[in-house]
Image (cartoon, coloured by chain):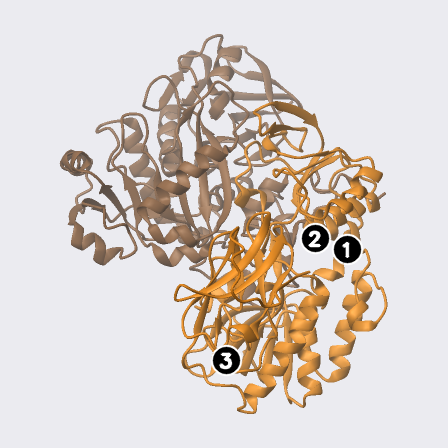
Chain colours: A brown, B orange
Amino acid sequence: MSVTDVAIVGAGVVGCAMARRFTLEGAKVVLLERGTDLLSGASKANSAILHTGFDAPAGSIELSCMQAGYSEYLAIRESFNLPLLETGAMVVAWSESERAVLEGIEAQARENGIGDVRRLTAEEIRSREPELSPRALEALLVPGEHVIDPWSPFLAYLLQAKTHGAEIAFATEVLSGAFDGKVWTLRTSTGERRARTVINCAGLYGDRLDARLLGAASFQIKPRKGQFVVFDKAAAKLLRTIILPVPSERTKGVVLTRTAFGNVLVGPTAEEQEDRERATVEENALRVLIARAVEMLPALADVDVTAVYAGLRPATEEKGYRISTHPNRNWITVGGIRSTGMTASLGIARHVYNLYEEMSHRHSPVAEPAALHVPNLAEDRPRDWQSSGYGEIVCHCEMVTLREIEQALSGPLPAGDFGGLKRRTRCGMGRCQGFYCNARLAELTKDHFASPLAIGDAA
Amino acid sequence: MSAPLDVANAEVLVIGAGPAGLAAATRLKSLGVRNVIVVDREPQAGGIPRHCGHPPFGMREFGRVLTGPVYARRLSERAQRAGAELLLGCSVVGIDHVGGIVVTCASSRGPTEIRAERIILATGVRETSRAARLISGDRPLGVLNTGALQSYAYLQHMAPFRRPVIVGTELVALSSLLTCRKIGAAPVAMIEDRDRPTVRRISMLLPHLLGVPVRYRTHIADIKGKQRVEAVTLRRDDGTLEDMECDGVLLTGRFMPEATLARSAGLEIDRGTGGPTIDQFGRTSEPRIFAAGNVLHPIETAGWSWREGRRIAEFVAADLAGQLPAVTRTVKLTPGESVRYVVPQRLVPERGGLTYLQLRVADDVSGALTARCRGQLIMTQPLTSAPERRVLAPISAFDRADGEVVFSFDDNRSATYRSDATCV
């Protein structure tokens, strides 16, 4: 059996960026993912904000990875056809006590190298965001905070990795493994895999993977559920800037933001739970989020809810990232990558590659990384329906074309499940939630998914 | 990237080729309007009836009982025979009415711009989604609306589940029982959060005959399932919980207008209906844009929408001939206590136009429907009704009102003036 240089476990935001980085550096990579598509665990649910790191702990690995990830995204996004909504963010103080904290946040931002932050008076807030509640007392403007498409970048990274020879194995769960001093033999649900080095990017199962293969984990995952509410696109004209709360010790708090797809999003909640699988939405929590959103942006009271979702963030018993190397076991653990992970992913990948090199591995980088465009889903850039020859519009709410659906179901990384198809095209994610298109999608995806939309023919 | 722009001109552009839109187009042609274009984003005309494989459709329109798909085809053929041009697979993406009306459409053939003198919006309704209902639980496959189920059954001949729980007891919930039979599905229960069915009790013989247990004062507290629905937890009003195995959840009814275009065109939207507001001639807040059918009032039958489409078309034709009264002074009609909506939402003080006001009550009521203007009682009418039942009142009773008219339901039957409001 062939031996790859690196086995990466987990195709979340971190694993996808990792597979790209290691491949571009010249390593032979296999990416093992338990789910039937990329981003099917913790990574599928986040607020899609590209953070500057203005409020990250100074001097932390998290901060340096966020900043490196931020810069690299800006540098490469055009080459992949990836969007950027230059919204800026305001940390808004809604009370005198919150107002008192702004100064500290501003100082932290400056210490973190974010020099363009500035304070906005209530009047300045109003002229920037006339629909925002007049209860906003003062804000810290962070111009560099932006909104991106939270899914397409990672598809782009994996496509690039695959183009340069990475192998990607879905529905492949790592069950056990043994290290013979040089090579790991991983027993997976789809057979054995051999690799010289293992990188654990297993997200919500990172500690379990360490425990199972290394014998012990140096951290413990404490799943933290986040629920979100997505408002109809009618809301997008109500808001330009990301509205951040003054953060608490535990969480960044409830954010109100536009999305790249033209909606307005509020969330997440922060609810600790034991279960690593179930990420349920709960009516009461959703109502609280909606009420909070309406409090901040009163005109939302007349806007319908388009979607609700929930995800689990792989928090640990400590705040920071839990990245560790085990040089004598050829193992690197990338654990506890919380909500900042989407921003930091490219930076984490670089950081981990440096750690890997320190373990005396050397490869020669790919001379010319392939340029490839992923389909654009963002509203501010041309969409497929705006050109001709698309066949038909399958999902009317999100204007998803037959051509886009067919493309997402074929090619080097076809959608492996309905969630993957939705993330690749946005079909079924609009205001009708499938009232019009679900059956047509069932027909179009017949024989493509292990879990098909239809369970059979009409009897 | 961008294909050459196709430009078309229409005297009247009808948006939506369902019963209301097709009826309007047919009527406009018979009244001698020259260029009538109907656009629909679907590849086939007919609207929702296309995938309602069950009768009865067409009594009023064709004098016989038809299934939905046959009815849809006939409406479409009739409109084409009358000379209306149907543009299918054509999605309206913008309505600009600052100067002349310009409608931008996307289609696989390339973008089209249609310049029109008048528009009739007939974009219909859809059911409220699981997300918008804020139902708790996992989000597996197998949770859908009746509209989607009908498409599975009648357009794709596929089954999304075999043992669903049906939520709701509106008429559409009963028709979904038949659709379930069609795909070989046996619903495990029908649940209703109120203490009685929304349809008349006699109709509840159907689930009884089909062996589907009905539970009132019950709602879904949790949906469980990793890939597909595996079970739901039902909660009764008294707090008791019960797990029920099933492989799907069918969310029926709670219709809302598909008013996205109306909203994006900047038309005034009624909070009660969720659709555009109109006067008694079907004119929205932009008087060159009319609306007809279920986009105005969730929800009416196909036959009602058809008849309304015809009537509104007559007003549009009159308007083109300069015969509609100008929108100068209007009287607002507003829902008050226990009234969910009133359509039209405003009247110009002239005769003509729609014959009846449409109302819906918010609760089960038994007493009187009243109308007050400046605190004066101007109409009272005995009324026993329930949500989702058709309630009508003659418009002629109000078009001379000299201020906002508020419609309420009163227990107080101190009638001073009687009019013939009807509950159908």
Residue A162 in view, yes or no? yes
Labels 2 and 3 within one chain: no
Q: Position of residue B100 (x, y in %)?
A: 46, 83
Labels 2 and 1 within one chain: no
Instruction: Name the residue carrying label 1.
Output: B155
Residue density around tag 3, few if under 14, some if 14–19, many if 20 or more, within 10 Å = many
The answer to the question of whether label 2 and label 1 lie on touching residues, with beta carbons closer than 8 A, is: yes
Instruction: Choose between B393 and B179: the one closer to the eye.
Output: B393
Q: Horizontal placement of B266 versus A297: left or right?
A: right
Specify the amino acid type for callout 1: Leu
Q: Could you give the CA–CA distance between mark 3 and mark 1, rounded to whole angstroms?
A: 36 Å
Q: Determine the secondary structure under disc 1.
A: helix
Q: Is residue A200 above or below residue A308?
A: above
Q: Position of residue B358 (x, y in %)?
A: 59, 64
Name the mark nearer the viewer: 2 or 3.
3
Instruction: Name the residue carrying label 2.
Output: A440
Specify the amino acid type for callout 3: Arg
Residue density around tag 1, few if under 14, some if 14–19, many if 20 or more, within 10 Å = some
Instruction: Name the residue carrying label 3.
Output: B288
Q: Could you give the CA–CA distance between mark 2 and mark 3, rounded to whole angstroms?
A: 35 Å
Q: Determine the secondary structure under disc 2.
A: helix
Residue B18 in view, yes or no? no
Specify the amino acid type for callout 2: Arg
